[in-house]
Image (cartoon, helix red, strand yellow):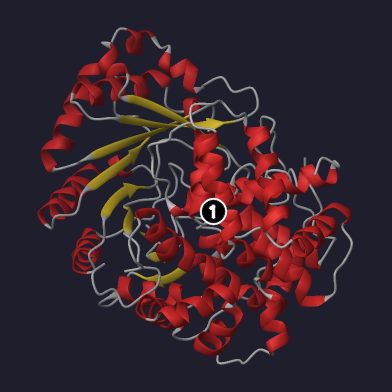
């Protein structure tokens, strides 16, 4: 944001959960969505949030959930409103609506007419218990025929049935011209248990250990994405643990300027800054140096689960509360080096 | 599989400092305008953060312990020259990543304050404790960005196989951390 008085100065995303209701009921759903969850955001509140996001020069808007398309009319109103404000929009959906290619074409046409700029699909072994993979393929094919990229997030598990490869080798995908096949981009992401004490089975090398800790980056979602959740809370990250970690909720959709207040509140919490520049795995590793009883290696393939752990494990919490501020110089220096110093050196320009 | 993690969330875990975000932003703005402050922050962030953000004055001893390792590398002309020469010497050659890491690790030891490097590596390999802030400073800095100077980009960026891409800062940090981790492995294996 130009003249942004807050830290960090990043291109922010407003994520809107119109509803927690979903046509699927995946085990360990990170947003705890289900067909029985009836929390909905009022459309008037959504429009106010979009207005404020535009005023605060947010970078884009993501409609997610729950399954946002279950509130089809309100979704279209919100996309049109954001588009009119100059905010690019993205939809995250499980594609339950794409029962045929014709259905997919029709629905997608309406979304694009409303101004939608990007669409992401979610699938995997859990999702396909409720939404057949063919629906995702139909939607992805319709998307690339429109010249858009179809991003497909696939649950990564040990020995999964639905994989990046199974999507790319689907009959309908292989029938596409190569130029359109290239626009279908499946990406595998570890599926995580919500219980931080439960260890899922991942392919080798996925879970964080001392050996691969240097590969663990900061969390670029926290303090960048602000989420208007269907129950009226405002989250400070897009993470799957957001509904389980009260500290990641930094306000409510109430009154005026609720986004601005949420940004200010979140930015005053050093722990969130620490997460942003070091990531939850390194915080766990740091805590384990203070308290050797804290075990973390090989447990977390999904960083949101590691984040839930550090917020909910009594031992980790104790170490952070007692000694966390000792990391402030290091973390703030990292932030400066990442955001200003190194970019200026790489570009050969002086620090702005 | 379930482990014995004891969950507790009766109190909010926040490290809240009123105005922290605003003060960090102001510090960054000040850094962009003040070369002297920038140098101090590079050499001794704990001093700057202490006075500018927290309002705490650290002792000289505490401050000097922080960053010695890493910024001896950053400021080291010999190491920078080594990196430039290394690039030139290997133009058009295929240098396997293992060898590149090894060469760079050796260069760190040769040019980058060997006493501190040795202390770092010995500490990491043995798990032995170094009292107080010195250990924290060494480990923390070794894992941090500070090696992420331009020569890391020049030397290690090619490991990614794309010589034309200007790496974002976070990638530089990642590479820097990988380099240190690899140096630790090599040292513990007796290879350097």
In the figure, is residue A150 to the left or right of A284? left
B20 to A205, vertically: above or below = below
Q: Residue, x 41% and y 59% (percent of image)?
A: A345
Q: Is residue A279 visible?
A: no
Q: Position of residue B58 (x, y in %)?
A: 66, 89
Please tell me in which quadrant of the rendered image residue A5 appears. Answer: bottom left
Q: Label 1, on which residue? A: B173
Q: Nearer the viewer, residue A61 or A242?
A: A61
Position in image of residue B43 (x %, y %): 58, 75
Identify the element where label 1 is drawn. Answer: helix
Give A190 or B6, whichever is nearer the viewer. A190
Quadrant holding the C terminus of chain B: top right
Location of residue B92 with respect to B143 vertically, above or below: above
Q: Which quarter of the rendered picture does the N terminus of chain B lie within?
A: top right
In the visual, does A124 lie left or right of B46?
A: left
Asked whether A350 or A261 is in front, the reply is A350
When the figure is inspected, residue A224 is found, relative to residue B176, above or below; the finding is below
- Residue B42 relative to residue B33: left or right: right
Kindly identify the residue that appears in the image at 60 percent across and 80 percent down.
B46
Residue A283 occupies quadrant: bottom right
- Could you tell me residue A51's position as x and y percent? 18, 65
- Residue A140 visible here: yes
User: What is the chain letter for disc 1?
Assistant: B
Q: Residues within 10 Å of mark 1 (few under 14, many from 20)?
A: many
> Residue B80 appears at what percent x and percent y?
55, 54
Q: Is residue A289 left or right of residue A125?
A: right
Seen in the picture, residue B50 relative to A312 is either above or below; the reply is below
């Amino acid at each position: 944001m130009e003249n942004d008085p807050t830290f960090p100065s990043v291109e922010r995303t407003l994520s809107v959960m119109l509803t927690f209701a979903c046509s699927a009921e995946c085990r360990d759903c990170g947003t705890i969505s289900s067909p029985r969850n009836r929390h909905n955001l009022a459309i008037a509140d959504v429009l106010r949030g979009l207005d404020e996001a535009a005023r605060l020069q947010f970078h884009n808007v993501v409609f997610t959930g729950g399954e946002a398309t279950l509130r089809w009319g309100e979704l279209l109103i919100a996309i049109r409103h954001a588009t009119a404000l100059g905010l690019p929009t993205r939809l995250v959906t499980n594609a339950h609506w794409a029962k045929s290619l014709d259905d997919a074409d029709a629905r997608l046409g309406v979304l694009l007419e409303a101004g939608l700029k990007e669409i992401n699909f979610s699938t995997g072994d859990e999702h396909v218990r409720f939404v057949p993979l063919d629906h995702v393929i139909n939607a992805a094919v319709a998307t690339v025929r429109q010249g858009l990229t179809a991003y497909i997030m696939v649950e990564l598990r040990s020995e999964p049935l639905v994989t990046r490869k199974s999507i790319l080798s689907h009959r309908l995908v292989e029938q596409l011209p190569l130029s359109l096949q290239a626009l279908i981009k499946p990406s595998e992401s570890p599926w995580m248990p919500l219980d931080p004490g439960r260890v899922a089975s991942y392919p080798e090398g996925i879970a964080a250990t001392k050996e691969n800790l240097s590969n663990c980056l900061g969390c670029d979602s926290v303090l960048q994405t602000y989420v208007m959740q269907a129950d009226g809370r405002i989250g400070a990250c897009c993470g799957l643990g957001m509904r389980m970690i009260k500290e990641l909720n930094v306000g409510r959709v109430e009154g005026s300027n609720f986004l601005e207040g949420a940004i200010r509140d979140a930015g005053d919490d050093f722990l969130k800054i620490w997460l942003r520049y070091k990531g939850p795995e390194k915080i766990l590793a740091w805590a384990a140096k203070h308290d050797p009883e804290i075990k973390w290696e090989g447990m977390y393939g999904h960083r949101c689960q590691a984040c839930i752990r550090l917020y909910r494990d009594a031992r980790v919490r104790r170490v952070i509360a007692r000694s966390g501020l000792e990391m402030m110089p290091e973390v703030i220096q990292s932030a400066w080096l990442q955001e200003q110093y190194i970019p200026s050196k790489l570009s050969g320009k002086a620090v702005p | 599989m379930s482990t014995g993690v004891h969950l507790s969330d009766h109190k909010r875990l926040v490290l809240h400092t009123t105005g922290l975000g605003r003060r960090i932003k102001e510090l960054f703005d000040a850094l962009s305008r003040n070369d002297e402050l920038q140098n101090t922050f590079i050499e001794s962030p704990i001093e700057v953060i202490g006075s500018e953000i927290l309002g705490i004055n650290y002792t000289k001893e505490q401050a000097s312990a922080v960053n010695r390792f890493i910024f001896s590398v950053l400021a080291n002309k010999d190491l920078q020259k080594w990196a430039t020469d290394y690039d030139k010497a290997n133009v058009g050659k295929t240098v396997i990543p293992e060898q590149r890491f090894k060469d760079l690790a050796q260069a760190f030891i040769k040019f980058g304050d060997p006493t501190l490097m040795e202390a770092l590596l010995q500490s990491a390999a043995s798990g032995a404790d170094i009292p107080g802030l010195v250990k924290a400073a060494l480990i923390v800095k070794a894992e941090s960005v500070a090696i992420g100077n331009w020569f890391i980009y020049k030397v290690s960026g090619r490991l990614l196989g794309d010589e034309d891409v200007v790496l974002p800062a976070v990638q530089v940090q990642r590479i820097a951390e990988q380099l240190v981790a690899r140096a630790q492995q090599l040292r513990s294996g007796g290879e350097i």
